[in-house]
Image: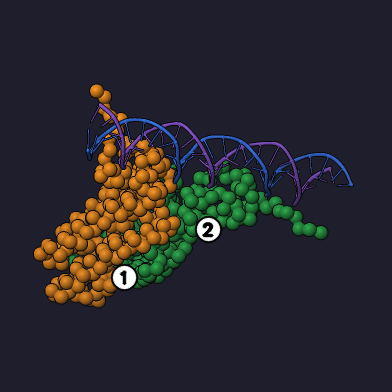
Chain colours: A green, B orange, C purple, D blue
Amino acid sequence: MSEPRFRRRKEDRPQEITEAALAAFAEKGYAATRVEEVAKRAGVSKGLLYLYFKTKEEMFKAVVRGLVIPRIDALAASIDTSGLSAEEFLRGPFVDFVKTLPGSPIAVVIRLMIAEGPKHPDLVQFYWDNVVSRGLSAITELLERGVRAGEFRRTTVNEMPHLLVMPAVFSVIFRLLFEKQALDTDRLIDTQVDLLLAHMKGGNS
Amino acid sequence: MSEPRFRRRKEDRPQEITEAALAAFAEKGYAATRVEEVAKRAGVSKGLLYLYFKTKEEMFKAVVRGLVIPRIDALAASIDTSGLSAEEFLRGPFVDFVKTLPGSPIAVVIRLMIAEGPKHPDLVQFYWDNVVSRGLSAITELLERGVRAGEFRRTTVNEMPHLLVMPAVFSVIFRLLFEKQALDTDRLIDTQVDLLLAHMKGGNS
DNA sequence: TCTCTTGCTGACTGATGGGTCATTAAGTAT
DNA sequence: ATACTTAATGACCCATCAGTCAGCAAGAGA
């Protein structure tokens, strides 16, 4: 006769909740987001959230974990599989990936990390181990490959892969805060990569 | 006989409160900081805060305003007064200033802006007008001076002064989150400035 | 010394929101 | 059908905290 008032979908709940939480956090930030708001977005009662996550904080951590790992895995994998030269990879898949960041869920995670990081040391540690550290190593390895192939000189950049990631982080933050004052983040990223490649390929230092 | 229980010091209160608030925000972030905690640090009762600031939010805004403006003014002024060439200014006062950022109160403000910005659009606007916009213009003007003097070619960098500020923002965030995994932020800044100067002085694009 | 002004206090309140739990109803097994 | 398990509800509890206000006391003025 009538629709049941709810369905039991134990399997799907965690991800649904996680997604709802991300959306809410993106709009209001962690502290300003009410648990009930997340519940509403997930189309579920507040009490249910506490069956899947012990506290609001646990929920927050689940969001970060669930979103970031897959993406990084994908990029790391593509470094190995693609038969591209180091320069081709940087100009191609790497730049593409970086350009998508400012508009992706990862941008939200980055903001959350900055805002809440100091209050969640274990989460920062997790993020460092699984994202930052691995990302930097992957880039270092890629540059090393370029040096071995005779594409690049060995320069300071080999010890500072940060220089390649920098524009991504900067763009994420800039877009987040000053959306209106459109900075052409794609161009910023391209320019920085051009600069670095020019420096690594020829020149004098 | 006995010390008075308090003194009336209308003049000094605002700054004392503002400083206490900054210290508290630096440790806990805005949302997690209790108004009473700020009062305690300022050695004052909670009620007093509300005589000088209508709300916690107003207090927050006062912190940002009071801390950042003076610094930016100082830097902007020194661009004009110093008789240095563009390159000398960049390698000298500019780099010095940027290097102090990650450890300065401004770093705290930057973090607060990222964390709370989306909830305070008017504050973001204020920050844009008085800090970011003015800072970028100053740099643009400096580069332009360099071009006119024949020091620099005109390149993409003239339209993207962001490239010079980027390492500062990146360093602030990096140090804030991953203090332990010491990134040599001074070196990062130097390297980026070297790269840009090399590009603007010679080369091919 | 006795006002009078006002900077300042601290106990109070009202609302908010994280977290709980007794109860209900969806699905499953017999 | 009937009994049983457990996903899901939502009304409730209560600690927390931003903001208030009646009264107090520091210092100025006479």
Give the residue displayed 28% in from the left and 52% down from the top: B66
Q: Earlier in the sequence, mark 2 or mark 1?
A: 2
> Position of A137 compared to C29: left or right?
left
Is A153 above or below relative to B11? below
Q: Position of residue B84 (x, y in %)?
A: 11, 64
> As drawn, is B144 to the left or to the right of A92?
left
Q: Which residue is mark 1?
A: A191
**Measured from the top left, where is residue B72 in percent x and y?**
24, 58
Relative height, residue B188 to residue B36 (above, below): below
At x 56%, y 56%, the residue is A20
Label 1 SS = helix
Query: Circle 2: is it few (<14), some (14-19), or many (20+) Cα within 10 Å?
Result: some
Q: Residue A115's spot in the image, x, y percent? A: 41, 51
Q: Which mark is residue A23?
A: 2
- Quarter holding the N terminus of chain A is bottom right
Question: On the same chain: label 2 and label 1?
Answer: yes
- Specify the farthest residue to the left: B83
As drawn, A14 above or below A86: above
Whether residue B81 appears in this view of the structure is yes
Q: Amino acid at mark 1?
A: Thr
Query: On screen, A150 above or below B101?
Result: below
Residue at position x 29%, y 65% from top? B133
The foreground one among A158 and B112 is B112
Query: On the rendered image, what quadrant is the C terminus of chain A found in?
Result: bottom left
Which three-letter amino acid code belongs to the residue tagged 2? Ala
User: Where in the figure is residue B144, as x and y percent of width and height?
Assistant: 19, 72
Residues at circles 2 and 1 in contact by the CB criterion of under 8 Å:
no
